[in-house]
Amino acid sequence: MTFPPMVLTAAMVGAETTRAQTPHLPITAEEIAEDAAKCREAGAAMVHLHVRKPDGSPSQDAELFRAAIRAIRKRCDVLIQTSTGGAVGMKVDERCGPLTLQGADRPDMATLSTGTVNFGDDVFWNPRPLVRDIAARIKALGIKPEIECFDCGMIDEARALAKDGLITLPAHFDFVLGVPGALAARPEALDFMIASIPDASTWTCAAMARHQLPFVELSAEKGGNARVGLEDNIFLSKGVLAKGNHELVAEAAKRARAKGRTLATPKEARELLRLT
Ligand code: KMH
Ligand code: ZN
């Protein structure tokens, strides 16, 4: 079967990875932009973006996002998907900081997690009213959400959001597999999720830690898209740190091509994911 070009997303920063874990985590706008340009060259069509304060702590501050988005767009044409998850414990207005950016600074996409989930020893808190609030803000900004599903019920919740007119179908889903306390990174789980999404929807898979690169191969075989990057995994191979997100993207690109997939450019990704 011939599949469409594969969209590779680089989850570059996250909220949990620390410089103590890897010295290669980009923190400043310039560091993020430099690595984003290398990710683009290596085959990424999109970056999933979090930002940090100068001390490295997670932030959803609009001005930090504005600086990172401008720095990235100055260097390359990669699509920018901002986080609305932020870090555990953040309140909704803080989480939605990047959704206040308009005009040339507006992100291309934003994430929308559709349910509460254990997140390691913490809880990533997404009760229904909060999810609806964030969905409405994404809709008002006129961009498309990536529905982050840490568990299967979150796909069903997306259908409920569509019924309420808060998202449109077909949607774009991200299956997040392997967060401790949530759905494990098992091939059967991926198969079930693929079978569960509404007709004509698109999907990507973000598997955690050592599962990241093997699940790029699985996603490639199954006709989907994939997310890699230091938010979810810091190792290129056992005990070997990735020297930046671009190394993980390059490895993902190699594995995707070995499975017969071509890689989407940002322009192709925009069409494939039906972004406005
Ligand atoms: N940092 C996690 C608690 C998102 O970006 O939308 C949530 C997260 C999801 O990373
Ligand atoms: Zn994230």
Image (spheres, rainbow, N blue to C red):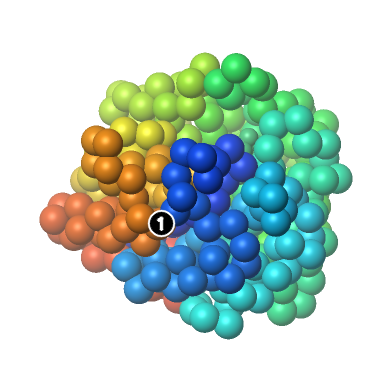
Q: Residue furthest right?
A: 93
Residue 24 percent coordinates (x, y): 44, 53
Is 253 situated above or below 86?
below
Identified by mark 1, the residue type is Asn
Q: Nearer the viewer, residue 275 or 71?
A: 71
Instruction: Kindly identify the residue that appears in the image at 86 percent across and 45 percent down.
Output: 93
| Visible residue check, residue 203 | no
Q: Quadrant of the C terminus?
A: bottom right
Disc 1 packing (10 Å; few <14; some 14–19; many ≥20): many
How many marks do you count on the picture? 1
Residue 71 percent coordinates (x, y): 61, 75
Q: Quadrant of residue 124?
A: top right
Q: Quadrant of residue 194?
A: top left
Is 171 situated above or below 64?
above
Is 142 situated above or below 134?
below
Judge left or right: residue 190 versus residue 12: left
Is 6 situated above or below 207?
below
Label 1 C-beta lies within 8 Å of the nearest ligand 2 atom: no
Instruction: Kindly identify the residue that appears in the image at 52 percent across and 17 percent down.
Output: 181
Residue 47 percent coordinates (x, y): 51, 60
| Visible residue check, residue 70 | yes
Residue 98 percent coordinates (x, y): 75, 58
Instruction: Kindly identify the residue that appears in the image at 52 percent across and 25 percent down.
Output: 151
Instruction: Kindly identify the residue that appears in the image at 25 percent across and 49 percent down.
Output: 220
Q: Nearer the viewer, residue 100 or 250?
A: 250
Which quarter is ligand 1 in?
Answer: top right
Judge left or right: residue 11 versus residue 254: right
Q: Quadrant of residue 91?
A: top right
| Residue highlighted by disc 1 | 245
What secondary structure is found at the residue carrying circle 1? helix
